[in-house]
Image (cartoon, grey):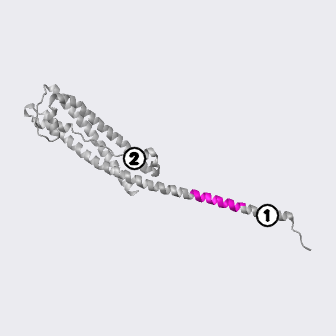
Amino acid sequence: MEEKEDPKATAITQHSRNWKSYFKEFFMLFLAIVLGFFVENQRESYVENKSADVLAQSMLEDLKQDRVALQEAIRFAQEKDDQIQNFLQMLHTPRVSWDTLAIYKSMTKVFTTFPFSPTDGTYLQMKSSGTLRFFNQMLVNKMNAYDNQLKKTVFRDEIVEKAEWELVPLAATLINFEVTGELRFNKPITTEMYLKIPDKNTLDILINKVAVVRTMMGRSLQEYKSQLALAENLIGELQTR
């Protein structure tokens, strides 16, 4: 006699098979999602690393330009300080011993400027776009420190320029600026070299204003050196990252 299947047992077996099939499909879907996230994260990480490499190289080039510019600015500031010192010593000597041409040349040097102009395009781009996050925090801190120092350095240059411009109105009453222009561009002197310093009070004011320029230049020189030290350090960090 043929044994009949138990409908209840058959239903349980079918349910079990369906559950296993659903579980397998769910597991495969879950695995596909996890794998997708992993692949996407890997892709984003690869893109970020490549972008970081490009940005680091670009900033490295900016810093190398800054380094050259800072070295030139330091050299110029030191030479100008020596020239202003000689000029002040000259003004403190008796007027009968003054060399008019030497005074004109010295005044020309006082008004010659060589401000430091930073190359900070890459850093500003990273800061505005949020791509600084591609770098580790220690390196970002050094980038930010360099930028903060830049603000101080540029500010000091502006103060030097202001001190020089405040000297112009007085100097314009004492000497012939046409001559200083000819000297500045190494042209033959074609106009009169005169010195119109009527009294000691006027001379003292001139000396004081020139001394202010020198003092401000000294502060600017300190900022140049601090900026250069930070540039050298940051260049080393970017080259070995």
Residue 217, image x and y in percent? 25, 39
Can residue 237 be seen here? The reply is no
Residue picked out by circle 2: 123
Q: Which residue is at 7% across, 32% downward? A: 96
Would residue 130 be found to the left or right of residue 177 on screen? right
Q: Is residue 14 magenta?
A: no
Kind of residue sitting beneath label 1: Gln
Q: CA distance from mark 1 to mark 2?
A: 66 Å
Q: Is residue 94 left or right of residue 225?
A: left
Please identify the residue farthest to the left as the structure is shown: 96
Q: Quadrant of the C terminus?
A: bottom left
Splitting the image into 4 quarters, where does residue 187 fall?
top left
Give coordinates of residue 212: x percent, y percent. Answer: 24, 33
Disc 1 designates what residue?
14
Q: Residue at x 41, y 46 (%)?
A: 125
Which mark sits nearer the N-terminus, 1 or 2? 1
9 to the left or right of 169: right
Quadrant (top left, top right, bottom left, bottom right) of the N terminus: bottom right
Magenta stretch bounds: 22-37
Q: Are marks 1 and 2 in contact (CB under 8 Å)?
A: no
Q: Position of residue 225 (x, y in %)?
A: 29, 45
Q: 26 or 146: which is nearer to us? A: 26
Give the amino acid type for the residue marked by disc 2 in the picture: Tyr
